[in-house]
Image (spheres, rainbow, N blue to C red):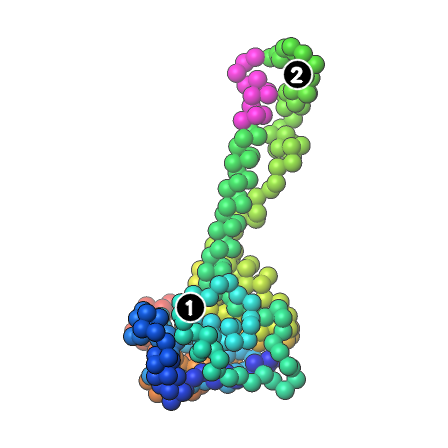
Amino acid sequence: MIYLRSFELVNSCEEDKFIVQYNREKPISMMTCYLNDPYPFNFFPQKNISGFDFSDITMLYGMNGSGKSTVLNIISEKLGVAKNPLFNYTPYYEEYLKMCEYKLDLHTTRVPANSRLIRSDDVFDYMLDIRAVNTGVDNDRQRMFDEYNIRRNVDGKNYYQLSSLDDYEELKERNYAKHHSKSEYTRRHGLVQNVRTVSNGEAAFDFFSSAITENALYLLDEPENSLSPRLQMRLAKYIEEASRFYGSQFIIATHSPFLLSMKGVRIYDLDSIEPCIPKKWTELGNVREYYALFKSHEKEFEV
């Protein structure tokens, strides 16, 4: 399913014209910090990147600093796609967005409301939240275990002397502890169970499988982070099925060969010094490096 058909960044002529006019109109005090780095202006034209035509699954390939994450941020801001706060936001950003253009597919007037930009930081935050919840549960469990041990009189005392009627509830708790296990005692006091504990990679995959639903546009920024090769292949299959059967469109910034090798995807090489046009995944720089590495060790893989 295609919702976003194409996206045009600001071309070099428009950029130059704007920056000259902008600097002429703004006071020096507002220009000083950004005069030499008017991000995101002056970034894409020098890389021969002007725009993209999207398919059901489009990959933005490039190493760190190639601009692939910036493209996703610009698209999400222009289209109003849900996301966490934007980073690297400068006084030039809103002006840049005004000059960008896009085309939706003929069957839609806007991207679905549940569309979303997902960064690797979102996944890390999810894993930290799980850890924080489990830490809190563990602390509560230890506190209840300590209470349980005291109420069973593990110090050798076999009695609890009532001094008033107010001690009756405490006596009931001690009697319960004497005749029940720790697990029964903690359940009686409503202890919440730990969130299911899995590896960081499994937790990251669970995040994507729950965050990616149907009929939406998803912008994924380096989703391979925290995923093993096996889980990257599982995620690739999940994305293929979400696109094919559940009407979702994907634009993915990545340098993972396990994602880039997906069948039928359109790939833009943001590292290329040539005009940015679709390429085969086998033509990409780091994929060729992987190939050369394994090829040089080919005999070691032979049984």
Viewed as shown, does residue 116 lie left or right of 295? right
Q: Which residues are magenta?
A: 146-157
Q: Secondary structure at mark 1?
A: loop
From the image, which quarter does the C terminus lie in? bottom left
From the image, which quarter does the N terminus lie in? bottom right
Q: Residue at x 51, y 50 (%)?
A: 129
Q: Tell me the crowding category of disc 1: few under 14, some 14 to 19, or many 20 or more residues within 10 angstroms, Cα based.
A: few
What residue would you read off at disc 1?
89
Q: Which mark is residue 10?
A: none
Q: From the viewer's perspective, is the residue at label 1 or at label 2 nearer?
A: 1
**Location of residue 217 in the rendering, given as x and y in whole percent from the top left corner:** 58, 74
Query: Residue 302 occupies which quadrant of the picture?
Result: bottom left
Q: Is residue 9 above or below residue 118?
A: below
Residue 28 seen in render: yes
Q: Residue at x 55, y 40 (%)?
A: 137
Residue 299 seen in render: no
Q: Amino acid at mark 1?
A: Tyr
Asked whether 171 or 177 is in front, the reply is 171
Query: Residue 260 occupies which quadrant of the picture?
Result: bottom left
What residue would you read off at disc 2?
167
Q: Is residue 212 above or below residue 49?
A: above
Q: Residue at x 31, y 73 (%)?
A: 28
